[in-house]
Amino acid sequence: MARAKGVNSQLALAYEKAYGLTPAAPQGYNMPFNQSKLVINQNLINSATIRDCRDQIQPAIGNTDVFGSIVVPIDQVGIGFWLQAMLGTPTTTGSWAPYTHVFKGPKRQLSMVLEQQYPDIPAYEMFNGCKVNNFAFYYGGDNELTANIYIAGAKRTVGARPFASSLSPLPFLKFSNFQGAVEEGGAQLAIVIEASLNVYFGLDGNTYTIDGNGCRTDLPEGILQVSGSIKAFFADTILLHKAVNNTKSSLTFKFTSGTHSLQFFMEEVIFQQTSPGIESDKGIYINLPFKAFYESGSVGSAIVATLVNGHASYAAV
């Protein structure tokens, strides 16, 4: 009897032209991933109807909640498809490789078909109407460089065949922690040992309608919230005073591998006041949470992602 194995499983991605609907001729991509834990939850509602016996009647079926997390490597090509789902189709320049793709926050996010594929059985678990609600990563230390992507969606269908007849493979070239850097105010910080970024998209998941078969009918976007933190050796009081005085600065998180790179630029940032404290007789660190925002910056967005790689286009189909 066949049993599903993670090593043989795949995660397929395609963009939807209309929310919650699988395209007629989808362009599917075989996405690299470490974990994919998309699930569906549907409540069974107990009935309070009284009959002439103590046995409860069949429960009613509640609304469905599609949600879950995906852990992906921060790589040089595949990450662009997630950036497009979050920040819209990029502006791409370059007549030959390397190409430069610039992603900014759109008014409306793209929705996706995501399919967890179990070919050993075979079974194909397709989730429609998926949007990214949260994107987060941490770097520094001696760990694999990955991002956590939190998904909200509309519905789930289980079938015996994949939604796309074939999946386009993607080159797999990873960035790593030691290729990372942090710039503050345009200058590289040599004292940072850890950094984190969290982008929250504020999706409204309460969009169930009477004729929606218990599924979300859309996922309207809310306010884009960008935050994170940097942990650094306490070598001077420059950053500390910027936090004390609410001095506006900028931050860039960047990864570079030869001519390829990925950067997250936050033009307007303020640091939260904290105290380094003295935890031991050894080196002292300072942890500085921050929030990014858009007020008057020239880039016109709280966060801009720039990906330089050999992939010619991320235009959604």
Image (tube, rainbow, N blue to C red):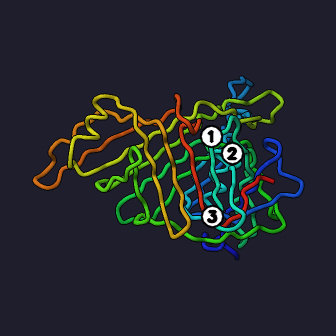
Q: Alpha-carbon distance for marks 2 and 1?
A: 7 Å
Q: Is residue 147 above or below residue 47?
A: below
The residue tagged 3 is 77
* Mark 2 secondary-structure assignment: loop
- Residue flagged by tag 3: what amino acid is it? Val
Disc 3 secondary structure class: loop
Left or right: where 293 falls relative to 209:
left
* Dot 3 or dot 1, earlier in sequence: 3
- Look at the numbered discs 2 and 1 and tell me whether their residues touch, using CB distance below 8 Å: yes
Q: Kindly state the secondary structure of the residue where label 1 is placed.
A: loop
The percent coordinates of residue 109 (x first, y second) are 69, 41
Q: Nearer the viewer, residue 245 or 207?
A: 245
Query: Closer to the camera, 182 or 218?
Result: 182
Q: Amino acid at mark 1?
A: Gly
> Which residue lies at the image location 84% right of the left edge and 30% below the top edge?
211
Q: Amino acid at mark 2?
A: Gly
Residue that mark 2 sits on? 88
